[in-house]
Amino acid sequence: MAIVDKKLSIRNRNKILVGVWQDEDNLVAAATALTHAGIHIHDIYTPYPVHGLDRIINARRSKLARIAFFFALIGLTLMTTMIWYMSVYDWPMNVGNKPLRFTPSWSPVMFEGTVLCTAFGMSFFFFWRNRLVHGIKNELLDIRQTDDRLIVAIETTADMDEKAILTMMKKNGAIELRSFHKGVQTILK
Amino acid sequence: MGHGHNHIEVKQEQFVFSTKAKRFSIILMIVGLVFAGIGIFTLGGLDNSHPPESSNVNHETESLTAQHHTKHEQNSGTLVSQTKENHSIGEESHGNEPNEDFGPRMVFRPSEKPASTHIWANLLIVGYFFLMISLASVMWYTIQYVANSGWSVAIKRVPEAMMTFIPIGFIVLMIALYFGKNEIYHWVHYEHLGLKPGEAGYDKILAGKSGFLNTTMLFAFPTVLVSIYYLLMRKLRSLSVQEDSAAKGDASFFKRGIRFSAVYTVLFGFTMSVLVWFVVMSVDAHWYSTIFGVYNFITHWVTSITIIAFIVAYLKKEGYLGVVSNEHMHDLGKFMFAFTVFWAYLWWSQYLLIWYAQIPEEMSYYQLRFEDYKFNFLLNFLVCFVIPFLGLLMRSAKRNRYVLGIIGSIMILGHYHDVWLMVFPGIFGPGMQFGFLELGIFLLFAGIFIFWVFTALSKRGLIATNHPYIEESVNHDVGV
């Protein structure tokens, strides 16, 4: 399934510096210090939500709402077409001599269909985007990010002073430092 | 932001009801009175010179009125039976002699109603509206307690002040019921005429309901219910103020608050419908809708939240509530938005089922509103759903107190108009307008409400500094 979001895979990125934290207060302080020093943090992986991190690392708003709108439109179209085909085109349905087309009675089907499509669409998109769908290999920088460790990932660029970044992470309470490049992990001192 | 381990000392604030705000509320009252005055003097009802249309007078009605003429003088002169087009509703079209079965339905034309009916009807909806808003604010408050909600603690003194309006709303409602019941509710007429259920001339449907729908119950039920709500409200308020002076970290008041809140949520949730049946649904006494209670609840609930957001925004603007941020405004905006959608859901559900089933008894309500009040009916949907939905959809709109202010004003007036639309067509029949009198009475009570609530707000500290969740509220963050 390599065609799926190749660009998003951490294997296809530059060398990534990985810092491991144990305590979320230290992590917040470290993230603040790194961002203030002008270093762009690629992402932070935590097993539980840490309040304020999204603002500190200037995370963008989730685009999930747009996906929701997209799937809602699909659901609405699908359901309108379906009920039109069933009760107007294929077999005109006379219910209590009510009008045939676009009556209030269509609204529950249209509404519920829209909600159903939106919910499923959002869920599947969310799982796909987070590489949790069957068939996409999930890449974890550190398996302990699903347990009790907090992982900071910084993607290096040519003009970055890696040494300084590592020192800064160490100073702010990182208990472990590593680098990750093309699928190879290297433990740093 | 999330430094949970650092203890935060929350400063107490004292709200002062400024002369500017006082002046504003008094101006509202005066404008309201002037508008109401204009409204009263432009009523057609004052002109009683033209006689009733004799061709429409039903014989039975005529004899009934004649019989009780002395007792019923103020109404009898303007009594007109069901007109021909109203028969098409189907309410009484079960046989060739409909009135033999169901008795005369007394329908007044708005221009022929005395001015007193207009005043009582207006006092009824305004008292009901503000009573329900105060009760809904208690509900909001208690839900925060039972849900163990933390974010709302910093603003909890606002609904706490709004609750105090319960007695005023209730007294106004009771005055309207006591003096206006004959003119507002057509089911009271039979009692007023001295008829017993089952007697000839007594409406058969109403005779079946008379065990429940009688004037004793009309006063007893709301009085008992609101008294219980009021006592629970007093208890919750006193627990909250006692907490302020309790020892630091004493959660016992909070825990007792949860217990009383649980009682209120369950009690109010189950019993408020009865209040709605008596006060509003019995205006159209033949008609019933099972969703009507919750529909009324949601109308006042969303208005109540809007008013909470208004007061919080005002306090922020005046420099109070230092610990309240855009995050709290955002959540209040979400509440407004969410329950706007829920309002539309109930509005539509009630309409859809009646439309589909096409049972004449149920259709009568919508027949009148959809045929004779089409503009108001559609306007109601526009101002209570379409405008708030589109206006509050964006995240940035919910975090902007000016947008909330504009959309919220439309919502409050819109929901008042919604209550008006539930009550007035039932009393006056076709041809009424939401005019100066309605607006005036509303503004008058809005002024009284502001004055009363702000006075209550200034009586205690503005922030519940000793609440166990105050820190969580101060740190509240909805994220990017």
Image: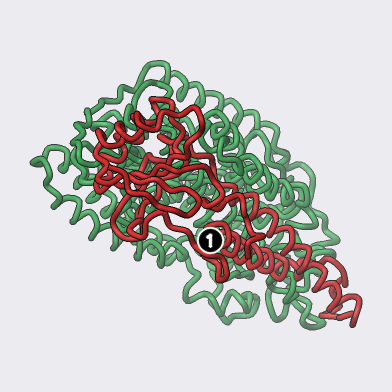
Chain colours: A red, B green
Give the image location of residue A144, x and y in percent: 32, 58
Q: Where B415 sits versus B190, above or below? A: above
Q: Secondary structure at mark 1?
A: loop
Is any part of residue B363 visible from this angle? yes
Quarter of the image holding residue B436? top right
Label tally: 1
Nearest to the observer: residue B175 or residue B339: B339
Q: Which residue is mark 1?
A: A131
Q: Where A113 sits versus B47, above or below? A: below
Q: Amino acid at mark 1?
A: Arg
Left of B367 or right of it: where is B467? left
Left of B479 or right of it: where is B379? right
Nearest to the observer: residue B389 or residue B420: B389
At a point 57% along the width and 77% down the height, the residue shown is B207
Q: Where B337 sits versus B273, above or below? A: above
Give the image location of residue B226, x and y in percent: 36, 56
